[in-house]
């Protein structure tokens, strides 16, 4: 193994943290929130693949493929919703959508 | 005997229950007949009991309270004292019931009235016949409740309801004394039975003179409340707010004599203490004097009679305080007759004059109401103690008993009593002259001047006055019969030789005569002094008159001494402690919790970015904590 597992985990953590920061800080654009989520998912995929490689088991790779498939579905659905929201409100600001509050 | 005694008590109570339950369903006439019939039935039963009476008898009807040593059976006792009283009570109450038919003719609430009146009578009969103190206390409280309900009978006017409450609360203060006395006696003697208590007395182990004195004073407090003696007399003049038959019943037969009766009943026990006896005598003499002076200045016809009741009950207490139980009973009975008569007569007058009660606005009723005038005059003469009416003999026997006790103390009381006789004559005749004497044109606004015709009275109201008038006038004859009948009660009264008695009677007659002369000169018609009095009555009262009219400002004094501090304390507890501390602290806590909820509620305002931040923060904390635990 050229790259040690700890390095992979570190990279995945950094990626995940970047995704979190992206989600939390870039509120003015829903698309950027989705991008943040994608980054976090990819960090997770990386951890799966690294684990699979480390212990020589295929399960992690299967999970990685599953996540990729799910992500593509999710993104297509989410982007469609973003388009719809933008049509209604002419904005993609996260805080503009408050209809879900309790009253 | 058992049946008769049961019927005496039970009939009026049954009448009350019947009226309450069925009164609304029955026609008016039936309710009236039922109420009167029950009381007269009770009187008939009393007569039966009297006819077969041979000696004191105790009848046990059943057990009432019985747990371990604490027993109080429902047992009635008939002895000379209770026998003479129940006959008087049922007779006078019967007449008052008859009178009420006429008096309440226009009132739609007659069912409540007659039910309460019956209950009143029944409670008093129970009180008088009770063999043990607990049963007596039941009657005592029953009487108190009925007086409260009847004084405030026309409760829709605040004044009447307040008068009822005042009567209840003031007598309640006395009741505390009686209740403490009864309980303490049970603790000492382990019995409620009156004869046993009276026999036990000082010889009982662990009972000294001090204890007897304390018991006697407690009972005296109870009697003060019920019999409206100083210092608890303030409720009686205000009790005039009730319908006039109720006033008659309270004053004559049922309510106020209960206290005197209690003291007479327990006299063998408490009479051995000179302190108690002296306290009773002083209370009586002071109240007699107080009532007479207040009646001198009072203008309201019924309140004059109320003050005269205070005064006469004071005489009875004075007699008890001199150990003259016979004289007290004699005066009690004669007083019942003439006071019922006076009140019923006053009710006639007030009704006839369209509810005018100020005697200075009356006058000339001798011509217009002759059927009321003559009985009323008889009652008034009896109250004034003019010989040879019953009132003269009964009052005279009291004064003789006081005189015969001898010594400075009783000598002073005798002088007070005799002076009060003079005052009594004056205020009584003042009332008669002003109400029935020739009316003056100077009396502005009097019904006579305005030529309002007197309202015709129901015949039954006038008829009932006559038996009472006869009894009041000739009650003196009964005195000697009663004296021999009640002789066993009278161990402590001093023996009076006939010569002394004659002299004392002469003195009393002279005093009465002087009173008549003074009253005639001052208020007798055709005299120039009368004009002056009437003119003075129209002006604002002088300070002395105002002092007397306000009942020596006792009400103000009590308001200042007790009611105001109490109200202050209650207001403080209400506004500062209850509302200020308890309520406010709870309110503050609730407000803080609410504000906290508002604060946290801002999280849920729908800001998605905040939700996400919270989600991440929560996840971070959880994961961090797991990590902390694991590593």
Image (cartoon, coloured by chain):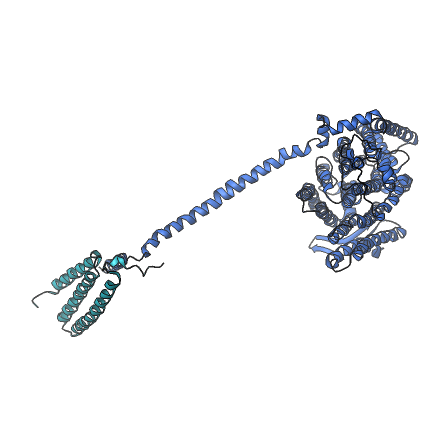
Chain colours: A cyan, B blue
- Residue B131's x, y, as percent? 78, 49
Q: Nearer the viewer, residue A30 or A12?
A: A30
Residue lying farthest to the left in this orientation = A2
* In this rendering, position of residue B387 left or right of residue B170: right
When the figure is inspected, residue B270 is found, relative to residue A2, above or below; the finding is above
- Residue B546's x, y, as percent? 71, 29
- Residue B65's x, y, as percent? 71, 55
When the figure is inspected, residue B43 is found, relative to residue B341, above or below; the finding is below
In this rendering, does residue B216 appear at all?
no
Examine the image and state in which quarter residue A30 appears. bottom left
When the figure is inspected, residue B542 is found, relative to residue B480, above or below; the finding is above
When the figure is inspected, residue A73 is found, relative to residue B110, above or below; the finding is below
Q: Nearer the viewer, residue B168 or B186?
A: B168
In this rendering, does residue B454 appear at all?
yes
Q: How many marks?
A: 0
Examine the image and state in which quarter residue B383 appears. top right
Q: The C terminus of chain B is located in which quarter? A: bottom left
- Residue B225's x, y, as percent? 71, 40
Q: The N terminus of chain B is located in which quarter? A: bottom right
Q: Nearer the viewer, residue B373 or B568?
A: B373
Examine the image and state in which quarter residue B515 appears. top right
């Amino acid at each position: 193994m050229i790259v040690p597992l700890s390095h992979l985990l570190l990279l995945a953590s950094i990626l995940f943290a970047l995704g979190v920061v992206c989600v939390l800080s870039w509120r003015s654009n829903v698309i950027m929130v989705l991008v943040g989520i994608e980054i976090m998912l990819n960090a997770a995929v990386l951890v799966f693949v690294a684990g699979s490689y480390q212990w020589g088991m295929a399960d992690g790779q299967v999970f990685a493929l599953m996540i990729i498939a799910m992500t593509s579905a999710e993104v297509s659905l989410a982007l469609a919703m973003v388009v719809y929201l933008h049509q209604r409100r002419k904005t993609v600001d996260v805080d503009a959508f408050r209809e879900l509050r309790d009253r | 005997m058992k049946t008769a005694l049961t019927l005496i008590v039970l009939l009026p109570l049954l009448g009350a229950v019947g009226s309450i339950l069925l009164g609304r369903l029955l026609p008016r006439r039936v309710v009236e007949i039922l109420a009167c019939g029950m009381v007269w039935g009770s009187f008939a039963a009393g007569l039966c009991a009297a006819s077969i009476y041979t000696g004191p008898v105790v009848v046990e009807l059943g057990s009432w309270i019985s747990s371990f040593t604490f027993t109080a059976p429902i047992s009635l006792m008939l002895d000379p004292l209770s026998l003479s009283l129940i006959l008087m009570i049922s007779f006078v109450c019967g007449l008052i019931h008859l009178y009420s038919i006429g008096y309440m003719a226009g009132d739609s609430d007659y069912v409540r009235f007659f039910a309460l009146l019956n209950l009143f009578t029944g409670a008093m009969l129970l009180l008088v016949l009770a063999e043990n103190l607990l049963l007596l206390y039941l009657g005592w409280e029953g009487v108190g409740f009925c007086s409260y309900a009847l004084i405030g009978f026309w409760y829709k006017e605040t004044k009447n309801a307040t008068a009822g409450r005042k009567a209840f609360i003031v007598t309640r203060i006395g009741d505390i004394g009686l209740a403490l006395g009864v309980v303490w006696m049970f603790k000492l003697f382990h019995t409620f039975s009156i004869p046993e208590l009276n026999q036990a007395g000082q010889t009982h182990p662990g009972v000294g003179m001090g204890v007897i004195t304390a018991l006697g004073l407690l009972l005296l407090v109870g009697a003060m409340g019920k019999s409206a003696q100083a210092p608890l007399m303030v409720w009686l003049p205000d009790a005039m707010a009730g319908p006039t038959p109720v006033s008659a019943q309270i004053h004559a037969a049922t309510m106020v004599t209960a206290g005197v009766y209690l003291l007479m009943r327990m006299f063998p026990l408490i009479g051995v203490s000179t302190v108690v006896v002296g306290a009773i005598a002083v209370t009586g003499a002071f109240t007699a004097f107080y009532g007479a002076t207040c009646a001198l200045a009072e203008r309201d016809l019924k309140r004059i009679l109320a003050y005269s009741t205070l005064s006469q009950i004071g005489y009875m207490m004075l007699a008890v305080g001199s150990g003259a139980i016979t004289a007290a009973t004699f005066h009690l009975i004669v007083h019942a007759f003439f006071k019922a008569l006076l009140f019923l007569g006053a009710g006639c007058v007030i009704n006839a004059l369209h509810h005018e009660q100020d005697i200075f606005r009356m006058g000339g009723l001798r011509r217009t109401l002759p059927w009321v005038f003559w009985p009323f005059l008889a009652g008034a003469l009896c109250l004034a103690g003019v010989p040879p009416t019953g009132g003269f003999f009964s009052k005279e026997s009291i004064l003789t008993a006081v005189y015969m006790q001898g010594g400075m103390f009783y000598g002073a009381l005798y002088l007070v009593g005799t002076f009060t006789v003079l005052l009594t004559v004056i205020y009584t005749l003042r009332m008669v002259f002003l109400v029935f004497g020739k009316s003056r044109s100077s009396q502005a606004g009097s019904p006579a001047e305005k030529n309002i015709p007197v309202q015709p009275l129901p015949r039954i109201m006038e008829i009932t006055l006559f038996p009472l008038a006869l009894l009041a006038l000739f009650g003196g004859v009964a005195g000697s019969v009663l004296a021999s009948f009640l002789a066993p009660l009278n161990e402590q009264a001093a023996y009076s030789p006939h010569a002394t008695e004659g002299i004392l009677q002469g003195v009393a007659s002279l005093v009465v005569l002087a009173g008549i002369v003074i009253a005639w000169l001052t208020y007798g018609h055709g005299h120039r002094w009368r004009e002056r009095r009437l003119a003075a009555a129209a002006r604002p009262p002088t300070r002395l008159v105002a002092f007397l009219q306000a009942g020596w400002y006792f009400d103000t004094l009590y308001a200042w001494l007790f009611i105001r501090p109490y109200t202050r304390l209650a207001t403080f507890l209400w506004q500062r402690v209850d509302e200020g501390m308890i309520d406010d602290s709870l309110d503050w806590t609730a407000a803080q919790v609410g504000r906290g909820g508002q604060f946290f509620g801002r999280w849920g305002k729908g800001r998605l970015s905040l939700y996400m931040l919270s989600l991440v923060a929560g996840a971070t904390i959880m994961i961090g904590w797991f990590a902390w635990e694991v590593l």
